[in-house]
């Protein structure tokens, strides 16, 4: 098959692209605007593969979308392109509205126009797979319940509100126009190639430099953590086997308090990097608590039983095994991290794109 992955130079998107090239016989076209979080070095492992292509495209550019979709003629479109950092959505909501809502609308329109012109056989097998987040459901604080596929939406941040909006658009394009869509909502991802501003890579890299480990509020916020390569495997399975119109929650079965996540990172580094930066006796001494994020949800937790019962998927990594792999990856890939820190990953894009 031929698969388009939007946002495929980002954290989850690049994991999906690498999975498709390495574990299937399918072709993949990554399209990405290459904002600050888009890193072509995350695609190094598959860049020269004959089944991989890349196009730099803004999903808000409908003409560019029309052209690339028609020319590539995909069997599946996996839509991961999104602004995704909650803190940035608080500081600058407009880019989230533009990319996550207007961009999804443009992609839906281009996909619908393409799908309508396919012959009946290809129409029946085409899929538009929209990848979303559990944050659209809001906050589970004060309850032991889990998010299910029927949990009402109650987003708290500009980011989650923009993703909720995009989910509603996708559902309406299926209901009103017949576009064959599927939606998945995932819990917090972690693993290799995660942009350093996010919690887990930030804690790892700050520890190695002897910098403070800032934890919001009291650190008691709970998240369900999903190893990104488990997620990529789930997304490919859903795109290929799920029924049209379905939605699936994808979680790691790993509820952890933020402070416990940071403590585990410190414990792993004590074992793997006993030679600490100057002045650091214990990595945990670097932990500090900072003013909590506005509107911070206290707990997310996913019931992923539907995807297990319908499609047989469950995560392969425990939180402990996945975290060990993650820390070891960052220790072995300092060049990737340093290129982000010094900005050279962005400056090298043009050279890479000309190859």
Image: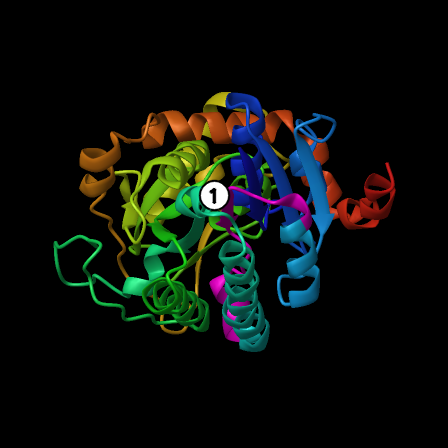
Indicate left or right for 344 with 65 as reference: right
The residue depicted at 12 percent of the width and 54 percent of the height is 144
Q: Say whether residue 135 is left or right of residue 39.
A: left
Q: List the single residue furthest toward the left.
A: 144
Q: Is residue 244 magenta?
A: no
Residue 31 in the image: state x and y as whole percent: 65, 49
Answer whether residue 85 is magenta in the image.
yes
Q: Is residue 163 visible?
A: yes
Residue, x 31% and y 30% (percent of image)?
Answer: 315
Task: Say which residue label 1 marks.
Answer: 122
Question: Circle 1: is it few (<14), some (14-19), or many (20+) Cα within 10 Å?
Answer: few
User: Residue 175's spot in the image, x, y percent?
Assistant: 32, 65
Q: Residue at x 54, y 62 (%)?
A: 113
Left or right, residue 30 beside residue 338: left
What residue span does the magenta drawing correspond to?
71-90
Which image quarter is the C terminus in? top right
Residue 274 appearing in the image: no
Q: Secondary structure at mark 1?
A: helix
Up the image or down, 174 lies above or below 209; here it is: below
Image position, residue 30 (x, y; %): 63, 44
Say how the picture is coloured.
Answer: rainbow
In this view, the residue in front, 310 or 217, is 310
């Amino acid at each position: 098959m031929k698969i388009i992955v939007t946002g495929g130079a980002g954290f989850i998107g690049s994991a999906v692209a690498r999975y498709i090239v390495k574990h299937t016989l399918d072709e993949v076209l990554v399209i990405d605007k290459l904002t600050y979080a888009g890193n072509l070095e995350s695609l190094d492992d598959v860049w020269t593969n004959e089944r991989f292509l890349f196009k730099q495209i803004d999903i808000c550019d409908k003409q560019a979308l029309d052209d690339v979709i028609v020319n590539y003629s995909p069997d599946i479109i996996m839509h991961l392109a999104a602004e995704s950092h909650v803190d940035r959505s608080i500081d600058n909501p407009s880019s989230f509205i533009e990319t996550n809502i207007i961009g999804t609308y443009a992609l839906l329109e281009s996909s619908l126009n393409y799908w309508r012109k396919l012959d009946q056989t290809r129409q029946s097998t085409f899929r538009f797979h929209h990848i979303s987040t559990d944050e659209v459901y809001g906050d589970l604080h004060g309850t032991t319940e889990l998010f299910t596929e029927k949990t009402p939406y109650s987003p708290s941040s500009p980011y989650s509100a923009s993703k909720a909006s995009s989910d509603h658009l996708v559902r309406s394009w299926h209901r009103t126009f017949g576009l064959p869509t599927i939606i998945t909502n995932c819990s917090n991802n972690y693993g290799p190639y995660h942009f350093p501003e996010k919690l887990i890579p930030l804690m790892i890299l700050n520890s190695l430099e002897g910098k403070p480990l800032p934890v919001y509020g009291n650190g008691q916020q709970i998240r369900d953590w999903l190893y990104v390569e488990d997620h990529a495997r789930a997304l490919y399975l859903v795109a290929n086997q799920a029924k049209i119109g379905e939605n699936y929650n994808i979680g790691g079965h790993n509820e952890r308090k933020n402070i416990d996540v940071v403590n585990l990172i410190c414990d792993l580094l004590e074992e793997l990097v006993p030679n600490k930066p100057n002045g650091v006796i214990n990595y945990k001494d670097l932990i500090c608590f900072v003013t909590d994020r506005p509107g911070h949800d206290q707990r997310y937790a996913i019931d992923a039983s539907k995807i297990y019962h319908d499609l047989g998927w469950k995560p392969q990594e425990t939180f402990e095994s996945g975290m060990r792999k993650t820390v070891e990856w960052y220790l072995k890939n300092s060049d990737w991290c340093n290129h982000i820190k010094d900005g050279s990953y962005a400056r090298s894009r043009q050279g890479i794109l000309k190859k």
